[in-house]
Amino acid sequence: MLKGLVIAGTHSGVGKTMVATGIMAVLCRKGHKVQPFKVGPDYIDPSYHSAVCGMPSRNLDTWLLEQTAVAQLFRRAMKNKELAVIEGVMGLFDGFRGEGEEGSTAHVAKLLRLPVVLVVDASAAARSVGAMVLGFKSFDPGLSLAGVILNGIAGERHLEFVKPSLEKAGVPLLGYIPRRPDLALPARHLGLIPTVEGKVSVEFYGRLVEQVERTIDVDRLLRLATPIDLSEPDSSLLFPEAPRAAKVAIALAKDKAFNFYYPDSLDLLEAWGAEIVSFSLLEDGELPSGIAGVYIGGGFPELYARELSENSSMRRSLQKAAQRGLPIYAECGGLMYLGENIEDSEGKSYPMAGVLPCRSSMKGSQLTLGYRKVRALDDNLLMSTGESVRGHEFHLSALKEEPGNVAAYDVLDQAGRKEGFRVKNTLASYIHLHLGSKRSLAPSFVDFCAGWKAATK
């Protein structure tokens, strides 16, 4: 029987990713077919899920995507699986706005009719934990709060001080994680470090699994997980009725510097007729041959600016391709790479591809974060003039120039702001898009590339 549950937190930083990853790892070692998920527009936390489950962790976001699309992507991912484990985002009830649940973990849990296990940081509390949990339990009667996992427990005495308050709140204690600096996940300016960078050792996962097996009742978690019904018809037709035969090859930049992609976006491109060809902007000397498009996602190009700059043959290859009109779509880190240079936090500048009339800088910049709704100013490889789409912005760098008359978008929720660049057939923006947020996005990209290929034969 297919079953699922949600691992949520009282707020950001309580250890959701550590706990969720540990539970996933233990379940997989027990032989269960676990499909991992992450609520929200996160690229980094899912990399930890994927590392222990051996399959892509998929995003569920009820603001970026219509609810019917979220349900369809969830059911599609669960085929031939046994158990869904969904890690939440921020605090359980935190979403797009303070007055509604859209985009929150609670919204996803209710949409999919799954129980919630709440991770609570008890490192600086004892009896007050019960009061906090009671508040979460009573805040939304439509939500099923199945139990609590405590993080930051100092010892047996600390645990015994907390237990009675949870009994009073009427919420089961399912386990705990003690204070252990050696279980802290590596982090930097935008959160955790992606696993692709190799900063997390095999020994770390071993320690985490050993701890979870010892102090969290994973068997009880399995019993608390609720059945999933895959028989409901899909009312959101993101995918074609049958996958299309590949008609174009699209090069995907994927390495330590660029690895922020939604797996469902790539699946959509393939379903609509794209062959995805991975390459590295760090290590390869030129673009793959025979391609009709390029997709450069986000990542941390600022950390690899010297290596990216030193790979001058790749920079020239991409610049020449852009000049001859090869369709190129880039987000965030991809935008930075396509600019003239990247300035690091010390003020040192590194030449980049020079496709776009902009320079990005880490020096003195501030974090830009939030959901965005943008409208296309002109026809581009994803949308027609006037079409709008929802996206997400999350970066520490800033551009030194405004896009001016080559801007790609109006940002509808920030009056007067022009964003992104559209130069020839290149579309680049700080805004990350999920290609499932609008049914036309993936087929438009594939068809645009196919049209360019046919026109340049």
Image (tube, grey):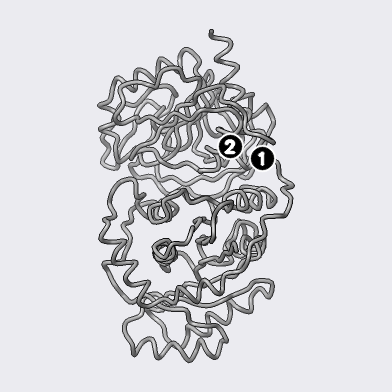
Horizontal and vertical percent position of residue 439 = 67, 37
Q: Is residue 212 above or below residue 336?
A: below
Say which residue appears at 64% left-offset and 51% top-offset.
70
Q: Amino acid at mark 2?
A: Leu
Horizontal and vertical percent position of residue 16 = 44, 65
Q: Helix, strand or loop at disc 2? A: helix
**Figure quadrant of the N terminus:** bottom right
Label 2, label 1: how far apart the Cα atoms are: 8 Å
Residue 403 seen in render: no
Q: Is residue 295 above or below residue 456?
A: below
Tell me which numbered mark, 2 or 1, is placed earlier along the sequence.
1
Mark 2 nearby-residue class (10 Å; few <14, some 14–19, many ≥20): many
Horizontal and vertical percent position of residue 148 = 50, 77
Residue 68 seen in render: yes
Asked whether disc 2 touches disc 1, contact meaning CB atoms under 8 Å apart, the reply is: yes
Q: Is residue 103 above or below residue 221?
A: above
Point out which mark residue 238 bears.
Answer: 1
Mark 1 nearby-residue class (10 Å; few <14, some 14–19, many ≥20): many
- Which residue is under mark 2? 268
Q: Amino acid at mark 1?
A: Leu
Horizontal and vertical percent position of residue 339 = 40, 27
Give the side of residue 305 with respect to residue 384, left or right.
left
